Image: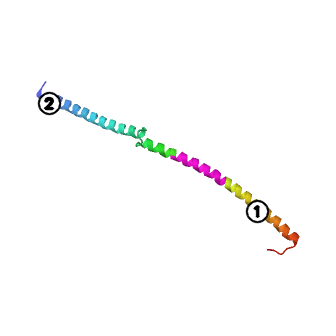
Amino acid sequence: MSDAETVALISTAGLVLVALIGLLVEQVRTRRRADSVVHEVTPNSGASMRDVVDRIDRRLVTSGERGERTEGKVDRLASRFDAHLEQAARESRIIERIVRHLDLPDA
């Protein structure tokens, strides 16, 4: 093997080693990023994004339940109010008949 071939072979081997080292470095970086993502989407001590999403979800469910209860209360109050208005209207008609019957002047 000539000196030129030896140099070419060593250069090629060096380039392959540099490429392999570059691939290993990129693999380590990718693994670290993947570990970081896994950490964020896995429930842990309460600091991960998953924990935050879970807390928000629980709060939304609780708020939704409160809203449903409040809506039910408002519906019941509206129904009671309507009943009171109907009763007041009946009483008002009765009073008008009494006033007409007694032939009293309008109030």
Query: Which residue sits furthest top?
Result: 1
Say what amino acid the circle numbered 1 marks.
Answer: Ala
User: Which image quarter: residue 77?
Assistant: bottom right
Q: Are marks 1 and 2 in contact (CB under 8 Å)?
A: no
- Boundaries of the magenta span: 59-75
Q: In the rendered view, would you say 4 is above or below 86? A: above
Q: In this view, does 94 lie above or below 57?
A: below
- Kind of residue at badge 2: Val
Q: How far apart are marks 1 and 2 (CA)?
A: 109 Å
Q: Is residue 19 or residue 41 the one in the foreground?
A: 41
Q: In this view, does 29 lie to the left or right of 55?
A: left
Secondary structure of the residue carrying tag 2 is helix
Quadrant position of the C terminus in the picture = bottom right
Magenta-colored stretch includes residue 33: no
What coloring was used for the rendering? rainbow
Expressed as whole percent of the image width and height from the top left, the position of residue 28 reads 30, 35
Which residue in the protein does label 2 denote?
Answer: 7
Please state which of residues 100 and 7 is positioned toward the viewer in this rendering: 100
Asked whether residue 60 is drawn in magenta, I would say yes
Task: Decide if residue 102 is on the left or right side of residue 37.
Answer: right
Spot occupied by residue 87 in the image (x, y as percentages of width and height): 77, 60
- The x and y percentages for residue 102 are 87, 71
Quarter occupied by residue 16: top left
Horizontal arrangement in the rendering, residue 104 relative to residue 78 (left or right): right
Callout in the foreground (1, 2): 1
Ranked by sequence position, the earlier of labels 1 and 2 is 2
Q: Which mark is residue 48?
A: none
Is 18 situated above or below 107? above
Q: Which residue is drawn at 48% across and 42% down?
A: 54
Camera-side residue of 6 and 81: 81
What percent of the width, then of the height, locates residue 25? Answer: 27, 36
* Res 88 label: 1
